[in-house]
Amino acid sequence: MTGAIDHRAQGGFCHSLLAVDAPDTIERQLVPLLRRKINARQAVLMVVGAATEQTVRDRLGGDADALQWAPPDGFYQRLGFAYRSFGRLLDERCSRRQPVHLVAEPDLISAASAPVNRAAAFLGYEAMVNDVFARYGCPITCIWHSHHHPATVIDGVREVHGRQVTVEGEQDNPRYMAPATYLNAHAQATMTPTPPVTEIDGLVWEVGQLATCRADVVDWAGRHRFAPAAARQVAMAISEVVSNGLQHGRPPVHMRAWAYHDTLIVHIEDHGAQPIPADAGYRPPATPVDAGGLWVARQLADVLLTHTGHGRTAVRLYFPYAVTHHNLDIP
Amino acid sequence: MSTGVLSVDRGFEVVDGCEVVWSAGQIAVSGEIDVGNAEVIGERIRALLGPPVVTVDCAAVTFLDVAGMRMLARVGAAAAAVNTTVRLRRSPSVAETFALCNVDALPGIVMDPGPTAGQDGLGRPEDSR
């Protein structure tokens, strides 16, 4: 559903898009916004790339020191991790009664040869920001560069932000879609066919096989030079998804795994035709006894796609080497 | 699954590859806890509840899935209901699962400081400069 936005339903939460489509967009649209915030003595946390930081500092001079700055690579790691990190930051600021305007510039450019578009996958999290982060009451401005991403991604970006920054200031975005609407529209991910021969190809019939399944995955990831800690995290994500397939789908669960350049890819399929809820795994467990397997899998994988059809439910997980090992303590 | 009795008040059991050793007021678990064995391990822990303090030593647990964490949460609730405090020792793997689920406290359970989240590369990135 695209249409009028009722920001009252979001408690006044503003999740704004600043679409960079010209060389001077940052100067003409972001800098005036930041100047207004500084003049109003409102806290602003900048999680932006070096070029944007340089432009802002050049234009604001010493006033830029009134802004708080955090390195973007501390956030933009695995997609679920990025989402969780921003959520924790806002939760902490909210509980300390230190509201902050977050300005974030997603660093998610995928190489043309990458097996999956990370930016497209991140839009599911961007959609859920409107739901999960609204309660913190901290405005968020996201900077997306039109020329860094395919037009389809930028179209999606415009559907997940309720507001947009323009030269006239912030305005409602008429193309905004509510989180559930956006996720439902994108729930059936397109996946490339699984290769005819894969490095792991096995069936899991019951939970007693999970330990063997994990051991196989750890060995396989190790053969692809994944560090032990990273390999264990890959296995944990797979274990949770296979476990879900056994409990919520219909055995056997078919697991296939292969590598594409430096990315490990695992495709898990069960015979259940019950679609995975479009928002599954986008919220942490509300209490420690709530289901959280897909939430954990989304933290540990970089990208996690789901698809239900033809009597089967499939989950595909991507573990790029560099992203999986980012900030990982390698023994 | 095998069960053995080491003495009158001590027991040993292998629950789907996970070793469980218990005596009055304490139980030690080593190996991997997942959805396949969590329920049985939870039953063994609950059977010990009643004294003011019961120590659950998971320092040698090498894997804990979300089902295992939910089991510990239910153990904590059961302990609180009978005025028992569960003292939980966590391995890095156990701490990692707790951190991934944003769980830093459980009713009825006192967690030994043990390892902290962040050692796995999934710690806190928001230190601003």
Image: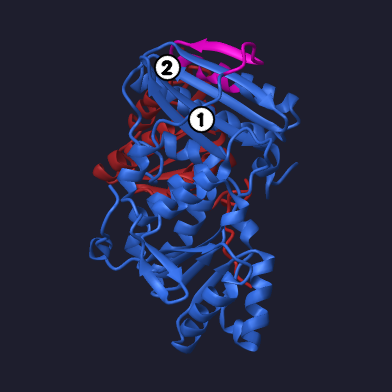
Circle nearer the viewer, 2 or 1: 2
Local packing at callout 2 (Cα closer than 10 Å; few below 14, some 14-19, many 20+) is many
> Where is residue B28 drawn, in percent x and y?
50, 32
Q: Quadrant of residue A114?
A: top right
Cα distance between the residues tagged 2 and 1? 32 Å
Q: Count of labels shown? A: 2
> Where is residue B83 drawn, in percent x and y?
27, 46
For badge 1, the amino acid type reads: Val
Q: Which residue occupies the foreground of this view, A116 or A226?
A: A116
For badge 2, the amino acid type reads: Asp
Magenta-span inclusion, residue A187: no
Q: Quadrant of residue B61?
A: top right
Local packing at callout 1 (Cα closer than 10 Å; few below 14, some 14-19, many 20+) is many
Establish if A210 lies above or below A284.
above
Q: Quadrant of residue A181?
A: top left
The residue carrying mark 1 is: B29
Magenta-span inclusion, residue A200: yes
The magenta span reads A194-214
